[in-house]
Image: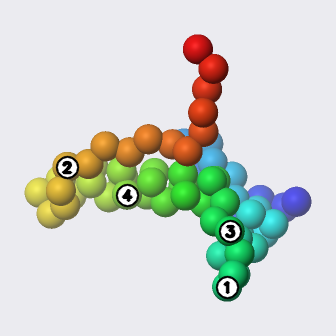
Amino acid sequence: HEVLVMHESSNIEITGRILQCLMPGAWLNDEVINLYFELLKEREKWEPKKFLKCHFFNTFFYKK
């Protein structure tokens, strides 16, 4: 699948297949959610006085 968007700082790649989760009635994809979190973190970093301080965690689980 062709990469449509690459978020450089987080290495998240978004393809057309992944974006299909934004269609009505579809389940959200974890990669789309994580990309949105990264965009919110960047927005907070660039304008810290304009937005509330927040902590974001990605949606993936890791083994110890």
Q: Amino acid at mark 2?
A: Lys
Q: Which residue is mark 1?
A: 24
Judging by the rendered image, the residue that carries numbered circle 2 is 53
Quadrant of residue 33 in the image? bottom right
Q: Is residue 55 left or right of residue 15?
A: left
Instruction: Name the N-terminal-most of marks 1 and 2.
Output: 1
Name which residue type carries label 4.
Leu
Categorize mark 2 by other alpha carbons within 10 Å: few (<14), some (14-19), many (20+).
few
Q: Quadrant of the C terminus?
A: top right
Above/below status of 20 relative to 62: below
- The three-letter code of the residue at mark 3 reads Trp
- Of the numbered discs 2 and 4, the one sitting upstream in the chain is 4
User: Alpha carbon of mark 1 to alpha carbon of mark 2: how far?
Assistant: 31 Å
Name the residue carrying label 3: 27
Tell me the element at label 4: helix
| Outermost residue toward the bottom in this view | 24
Separation of residues labelled 3 and 2 (CA atoms): 28 Å
Q: Are marks 3 and 1 in contact (CB under 8 Å)?
A: no
Whichever of callouts 3 and 2 sits on the residue coming sooner in the sequence is: 3
Residue furthest top in the image: 64
Q: Is residue 47 above or below residue 53?
A: below
Cα distance in 3D space between marks 4 and 3: 21 Å
Disc 1 marks a residue whose amino acid type is: Pro
Residue 2 in view in this figure? yes
The residue at 46%/51% (across/down) is 38
